[in-house]
Image (cartoon, rainbow, N blue to C red):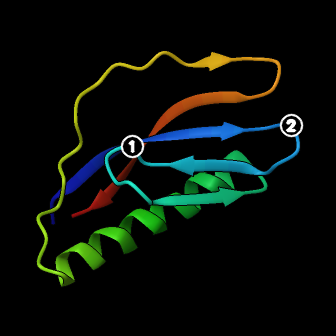
Amino acid sequence: MKRIQYLVRINKDPDSDWGASVPDLPGCVATGKTIDGALRRIEKAIQLHLRGMREDGLMLPLPRRRSVTPRRSSRQVDFYATVEVAA
């Protein structure tokens, strides 16, 4: 089975858990008490999102190549990771 790596944005505001979202899959999000927890959950969310797209007969979006610049402000932490899933 083919494997695809999607870019995942990880962020945290001071009063929240860690959040994860996938820029190439709008609406595919997850949260977790830890970074690892958010990454585990977003991996499952990506798999579920892709399965739903397949069941609906939609083409799976390939990840776009992009460069990102992590940032940190006094209110928020932002960084990026990749998650590899079976496609």
Badge 1 local density, few (<14 within 10 Å), some, or many (20+)?
Answer: some
For image coordinates 23% across by 29% down, the residue present is: 65
Give the quadrant of residue 47: bottom left
Which corner quadrant holds the N terminus?
Answer: bottom left
Question: Furthest residue to the bottom?
Answer: 55
Locate residue 59, reporting x and y percent.
11, 64
For image coordinates 38% across by 74% down, the residue present is: 48
Q: Is residue 82 left or right of residue 34?
A: left
In the image, residue 71 sits, relative to residue 10, either above or below, namely: above
Residue annotated with mark 2: 14
Residue 23, labelled with which disc?
1
Badge 2 local density, few (<14 within 10 Å), some, or many (20+)?
Answer: few
Dot 2 amino acid type: Pro
Secondary structure type for disc 1: loop
The answer to whether the residue labelled 2 contacts the one labelled 1, judged by CB atoms less than 8 Å apart, is no
Dot 2 or dot 1, earlier in sequence = 2
In the image, residue 47 sits, relative to residue 10, either above or below, namely: below
Q: Nearer the viewer, residue 27 or 17?
A: 27
Q: Is residue 4 left or right of residue 72?
A: left
Dot 1 amino acid type: Pro
Q: CA distance from mark 2 to mark 1?
A: 22 Å
Number of numbered discs visible in the structure rendering: 2
For image coordinates 81% across by 26% down, the residue present is: 75
Give the quadrant of residue 79: top right
Q: Nearer the viewer, residue 3 or 20?
A: 20
Q: Nearer the viewer, residue 23 or 63?
A: 23
Residue 51, labelled with which disc?
none
Locate residue 43, reporting x and y percent.
46, 60
Secondary structure type for disc 2: loop
Q: Is residue 45 left or right of residue 53?
A: right
